[in-house]
Amino acid sequence: MSDLTRLTAAETARIVRDGEASAEDVTQAHLDRIAKVDEKVHAFLHVDAEGAIAAARRVDERRAAGEQLGPLAGVPLALKDVFTMEGVPTTCGSKILEGWRPPYDATVTRRIKDAGLVILGKTNMDEFAMGSSTENSAFGPTHNPWDLDRIPGGSGGGSSASVAAYFAPLAIGTDTGGSIRQPAAVTGTVGAKPTYGGVSRYGLIALASSLDQAGPCARNVLDAALLHEVIAGHDPFDSTSIDAPAPAVVDAARRADVKGMRIGVVREFAGDGYQAGVEQRFREAVDTLTDLGAQVVEVSCPHFTYALAAYYLILPSECSSNLARFDAMRYGLRVGDDGTRSAEEVMSMTRDAGFGDEVKRRIVLGTYALSSGYYDAFYGQAQRVRTLITDDFTAAFERCDVLVSPTTPTTAFRLGERIDDPLAMYLADLCTIPSNLSGGAAMSVPCGLAPDDGLPVGLQIMAPALADDRMYRVAAAFEAAYVDAHGPILDGAPAL
Amino acid sequence: MAITRDEVAHLARLSRLALSEDELEHFATQLEVILGAVARVAEVAADDIVPTSHSVPLTNVFRPDEVRPSLDPAAALAAAPATEGVRFRVPRILDEES
Amino acid sequence: MTVPTVDEALSRWEPVVGMETHVELGTLSKMFCGCTTAFGGAPNAHTCPVCLGLPGALPVANEAAIRYTILIGLALHCEIAQWCRFARKNYFYPDMPKNFQISQYDEPLCTDGWLDVESGGETHRIGIERVHLEEDTGKSLHVGGATGRIHGADHSLVDYNRAGIPLVEIVTRPDIGSAAVAKAYVAALRDVVRAIGASDVKMEEGSLRCDVNVSLRPIGSETLGTRAEVKNVNSLRSVERAVHHEVTRQAVRLDAGERIVQETRHFHEDSGTTTSGRSKEEAQDYRYFPEPDLVPIAPSREWVEELRASLPEMPAERRRRLTAELGLTEADQAAMANAGVLDLVLASVEAGAPAADARNWWLGDLLAQANAAEIEPGELGVTPAQVARVCQLIADGTLTATMAKQVFAGIVETGEDPDAVVAAKGLRQVSDVGALGAAVDDAIAAQPEVAQKVRDGKVAAAGALVGAVMKATRGQANAAVVRDLVLQRLGVDPATA
């Protein structure tokens, strides 16, 4: 039998369903590869081999009992360590949560289990999802499978790398400012941020509540859509969950045609700071879409240039509050409790010891932005910019069905290159942030290797809220044309 | 946009971070740069713009008043750094709040 | 510096009082999760990922809590917001699991209302600034140290059962001019909340808690003085005591030409005094911002009008109606109102007690018991329905008046219903002639001279013999039956006596 780790998720599910391979064999093949290769990549913080095998056996038993299996039953999956999973260590890449085993499943975790997917383990991430490189993980960075000296993107670098390195055909990420799409772009994989409210946030350890959204990571668009449908849909445990039928993204991915669609190129996402090779592959992608019958128009979203500034006020503000609960009282790390120190001192010492630099930086920044004297000038004004960005999207979507841009201004940078320059690091999310601020859907699909460094480039497709299906249609059409012309992009990645 | 070491120290106290002297200096420098960049939001004239706090157009999301099972107390306490009986044990508390 | 009496202080200074009252709502489940709100229970047995603030958990608002808050707002003649949001109030405290409290800030659910309060024979209209909804905190037990108080404790033990219970905060304008009105306001507010069914307001379980803001100004002045915010004022009596204490405390300073520091002060039930807490100058910056995990509340006008139409008769109106129906005189009403029993009497009558009996029990034995325990009659734990039942048991001959007193004592002691107390204490009036015969014979044998007087026609002397029988039967005999028996034994026809 061919290498079980090389199959698509859809194909893996089919062979399990048809009895060509057991879910246990599929799972074991992936666990073996992780055991062999992950010491180079460090995509996982925790591999739950025992739990994975048990879950796979349950699928095999259900099949043996003649039960109808779901479209992804038996498919291995890597879960970003930002989701709670009952009894399984959940750290968010932070020392402050080291050893914590949650007493409950996130809704996403529950839906994945219920659909018969096999959770292999928890993937590495920037601490509390703050970063664009996974270098902010307290447990060491993840390495890009394309070049182990480079970053895999972040914060969900572990999820994208595990997909790119064939540790799992599917992974779950979360996207607050680009943490699914930017890692997908720099690892040559597919990543989608659903419409805000499309996937439950219950059990997703919050970074910025009004921006966070969980989504699928995969090696192709159809697989991403299949996983998207598993996790999407209303959840009464999340007040911000949309109570409407989830968009039919699988149908859209199968339809894969852009004829007659109007595609807008955002004028503001070009020029200074954009790598030449990225811009070139992006222009070629736009040409491909034109060739496929789409009508391409240029649109201007003037307030997008303020998105980064607004984001770095809103995010730290919300996260300074969300992360206040890590205080050494009820769970997690406790430092300095010698019987004489006060709760306040123990909290402060624990938080200083347990949080990394980027987390502390953002907590202080957010505390500042919410302070009574500065609230209006910073947080309030950032929320107004947010309104203007949403208005820009609304105007643009009157003229076109989707917007496109490069996913990131550059390809994967080197580990360590930007770690001491927070602002340079923040620029990696320049193109992805507007969709988080507006709540719309957006995804990244590979559009080639940059001619200047041979590393993957991502095409970002942005759709209005609740029109996730539209971006899957475009992504699938583009992917088909690209694979037709060049073969799957990951075929060009080095063997590990 | 100047932010002093003392201001950072005040913010750190508010957010319960026992930052070292080095961290205070380092963060003051970095925050000044970051604040300088994010202060751009002020360039947008936005007096008549309604701020967006939520990007979903939802209102009145309520749950019915129904009791659901609580956690098993052992599970509630399992991750606590310290317990005494079935309570969370915490260091002495300095002052009463609210 | 000598401390003036309250009356001396009030001869120079006028108190200005504003109240912030927190009421735990009587929902079945907590504000943002499905854990029960039941009082008691093993520590931390009523907790879940949401109310423990576990990473990843999210709040979902309880519809009943929103409804009760709107009902309270409507009963207090407030405007109901068309659109408002929850906000996070950020501060660190070990009994607050998320280290922020979900509350409301500049967008409360209800604003600008009033409540009329009767005190000293006058009606005082108290302005209501706002009514908003928030979540309660857990409870800390301070261990070690001499006092059991927070200061000097070695460590604390936290129980999060109370964390997340819905709490309504009702804020008045600084419209209250005396301790008596402050107390009457809290009582009136409590009655309104109870009437709506939003809470049963058990003050002894801490389900109504007051912060009392007190300042003084020279009599006749229009400017507000600097205020102290007194926290932990958790009973009607304490409200009055706290205001009185602050009046004298602040008067001493003002008389001496000092200024009052704006600060938080803690009230101590035991001593009736207040002590300084955290000074407001170094107050927390709560960094309020709209709660992103909860979407805005936009009560439809139809819903609000539906709720308005569903409001029951308010206690003040009910009181007016019932006093008119019962034909109570102004003096009666005033006596009962001053003793804090008017509503209890009216409710007892509504529950079936004869008006005169209800009045006598509440103004007599029950008031005396409350005074002895230094609590309000309403806090005794005796309900109007129980009073009505006891009256019925007297009327049907089951209980004597003496026994009824024992029954009330038993209710206060055990919390049981009258019938259960009667059964437990074996309190049942003995009317059986056979059972009483021996006791009557003994009494006659013991007091032959008295017996002779009766035989001689001095029927009134029989009282001493009846008394002896009552004593011998420990009050359980039916006095009328005993009297008849005594007279029969001594050859007097009870019918002609």
Image (cartoon, coloured by chain):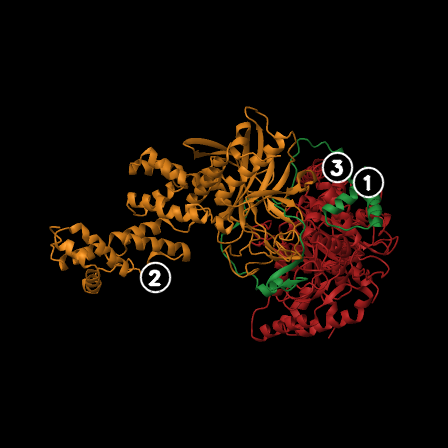
Chain colours: A red, B green, C orange
Callout 2: residue from which chain? C
Q: Residue furthest right?
A: A452
Disc assigned to residue B41: 3
Residue A122: image location, x then y, percent: 71, 63
Residue for badge 1: B4
> What's under tag 2, amino acid-wise?
Lys
Report the residue at 59% width, 42% height from top.
C274
Give how far apart the Cα atoms at labels 2 and 3 are: 77 Å
Residue A314 position within the rendered picture, expressed as x and y whole percent measured from the top left: 71, 43
- Say which amino acid is labelled 3: Val
Along the line of sight, the residue nearer the viewer: A114 or C284:
C284
Picture quadrant of residue C422: bottom left
Q: Left or right of C268: which side holds C421? A: left
Q: Count neighbours of disc 3 (C-alpha within 10 A) and say few if under 14, some if 14 to 19, many if 20 or more.
A: many
Instruction: Say which amino acid is labelled 1.
Output: Thr
From the image, tell me which residue sits under label 2: C425
